[in-house]
Amino acid sequence: MTTTGADDSAGRRDPAARRTRLRQYQEQLLERMQAAKNGAGASVAQLGLGIGGARYLVDLADVGEIVAPVPVSPVPLTRPWYLGLANVRGSLLGVIDLARYLDEDNAPATPAAPGSSPRLLVFAPGLGLNCALLASSVYGLRHAGTMTRDGDALRDVDGNTWMPLSLAALVREERFLHIAR
């Protein structure tokens, strides 16, 4: 039996073809990450999040990773939006409920959207803050370039409203940095 790149089952058994596909995938991923860091891809593909009943778009360059929620240890004498500390892969992260942060006096805790599971959106290391946002749902990549502007928001073809959210700007806000009551 000869092995060719066109034959899928044979290609899976051919280590050289597999390494070639893996190398191509890694090169494409590296190009996309570089584009996001340079700003070229940030306006095109962003991560869609559901937080407190609203939808947000986050630049991929600001995102470190997305993880399933882990136990959070409350920290006494902190703001209601500061949920506490979580251990994610050996790093302690402050966990923030953004819905409560944006409307501290009135917002209830971020509920999980029906049919979805909450996630923690870990900030990219380049932002210089060990932090994660609690998201009620993650909608995946969204292409902001295909959306229409509606004031400060964007509207997709399905009529959903998306608010841009800059994690880089968030970590520069004085109130965000002061969690103590």
Image: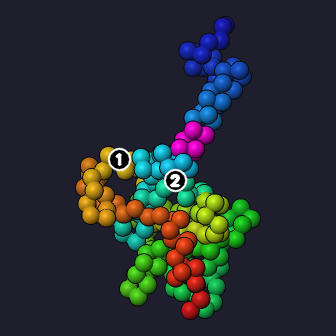
**Disc count in the image?**
2
Q: Which residues are magenta?
A: 29-35
Q: Which residue is mark 1?
A: 145
| First in residue order: circle 2 vs circle 1 | 2
User: With respect to residue 119, does 28 lie above or below?
Assistant: above
Q: Position of residue 46 (x, y in %)?
A: 45, 52
SS of the residue under disc 2: helix
* Residue 135 visible to an observer of this rendering: yes
* Residue 69 visible to an observer of this rendering: no
In terms of depth relative to the viewer, which is nearer, 111 or 180?
180
User: With respect to residue 116, does 2 lie above or below?
Assistant: above
Q: Position of residue 65 (x, y in %)?
A: 59, 56
Q: Position of residue 140 (x, y in %)?
A: 45, 51
Q: How is the structure coloured here?
A: rainbow
Which numbered dot is residue 60? Answer: 2
Residue beneath the point at 61% across and 40% down: 30
Q: Is residue 30 magenta?
A: yes
Q: Is residue 71 magenta?
A: no
User: With respect to residue 84, does 12 lie above or below?
Assistant: above
In terms of depth relative to the viewer, which is nearer, 154 or 172?
172
Q: Position of residue 58 (x, y in %)?
A: 46, 59
CA distance for labels 2 and 1: 15 Å
Magenta part, dominant SS:
helix
User: With respect to residue 77, does 21 lie above or below?
Assistant: above
Q: Amino acid at mark 2?
A: Leu
Quarter of the image where one finds residue 96: bottom right
Residue beneath the point at 65% across and 76% down: 85
Q: Residues within 10 Å of mark 2 (few under 14, many from 20)?
A: many
Quadrant including the C terminus: bottom right
